[in-house]
Amino acid sequence: VQREMSSLPRVYITRQIPPEGLKILSESGQVQFDLWDSDDVPVPRKELLQKVKGVDALVCVLTEKIDAELLDAAGPNLKVLSTMSVGFDHLSLEELKKRGIRVGYTPDVLTDSVAELTVALLLTTSRRLIEATHEAKSGGWGTWRTLWLCGYELANSTVGILGLGRIGVAIAERLKPFKVKKFIYTDVAPRPELASLIDAEYVSMDELASQSDFLTVCCALTPETKDICNKDLFSKMKNTSIFINTSRGGVVDQEDLYEALSSGQIAGAGLDVTVPEPLPTSHPLFTLNNCVILPHIASASYSTRNAMSALAANNLLLGLKGQTNHLKH
Ligand code: DGY
């Protein structure tokens, strides 16, 4: 960690990010930086508000709320915010724009990792793998039974994608070899270029709900998508269908999801994201056998997290030079 005082632009990093990014910043010779030297706990808000005072640039992760309070605490030197995430719902884009702050994020580098995990979560949920290992270990494994632990298969199924972007396409590409019959998607408008890559048909939200055997959520969390997966949607889904969310917890009304899962309105759900995170262990969703919950690990491979760290560092350096690989806001 460089802590010497110099005339180089000052950067604060809100988390001990993976080594690639730190190496890029150190070796650039273009910045001096300080960081919250832990990966296990986020920087306390009070400390963060102190640390950002007067900095030229900030690297953050998705646990930090970048809002008016924080930007005011940072002051007018702040030119660049670089988040080590593809999601940007923790950023007040309006406040950043008002202050002319450039915003970098990390699309593309995590697409493969997130798509891979989404497929794993989908199969884990639909083939009831968590229940199955539990039964095997805990003495529930009696004789071979004809309908015991049966689930739903991808072959001949219709897979629905809510919000078609890079990640949705990558998920579909991976699912196709499982002999999926049809891909459908919905979004604010048709996205023919992306859809043609996976031969997906544009449908309404209602059609997505009623036709999907597997419905996977791949949209960003915005005011428009908040709670978009609610009882309206679940009530139109088949009772044999599986719901998967690896985007953001906020797109789901969790009470409605609990209701849909516990009443048998839908067959199962796999969630990598929840509200809040971590989801309290006492949360009712944890009581359901047909709900698989992961602790937000979709991009958690060593190579991807290092690539995200490197991209966040490079975005920051580019941003300080006034160049762009940046989120439009
Ligand atoms: C993101 O990048 O937004 C993910 O949620 C964490 O990789």
Image (spheres, rainbow, N blue to C red):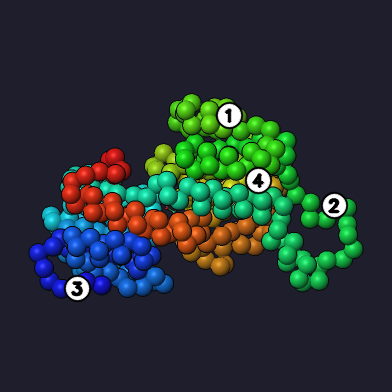
From the viewer's side, name the closer residue of 87 and 286: 87
Residues at marks 4 and 1, CA–CA distance in whole angstroms: 21 Å
> Which numbered circle lies on residue 242?
4
| Place of residue 55 in the rendered image (x, y in percent of width and height, measured from the top left) | 17, 61
Label 2 belongs to which residue? 147
Q: Amino acid at mark 3?
A: Arg
Q: Marks 1 and 2, Cα distance to the nearest angstrom?
A: 34 Å
- What residue does disc 1 label? 199
Cβ–Cβ under 8 Å for marks 4 and 3: no
Tell me the CA gap for discs 2 and 4: 18 Å
Q: Is residue 320 visible?
A: yes
Q: CA distance from mark 3 to mark 1?
A: 53 Å
* Marked residue nearer the N-terminal end (4 or 3): 3
Where's residue 169, x and y in %?
52, 38
Q: Which mark is residue 185?
A: none
Viewer-nearest of discs 4 and 3: 3
Label 1 or label 2, whichever lies nearer to me, is 1
> Alpha-carbon neighbours of circle 4 within 10 Å: few (<14), some, or many (≥20)?
many
Quarter containing the N terminus:
bottom left
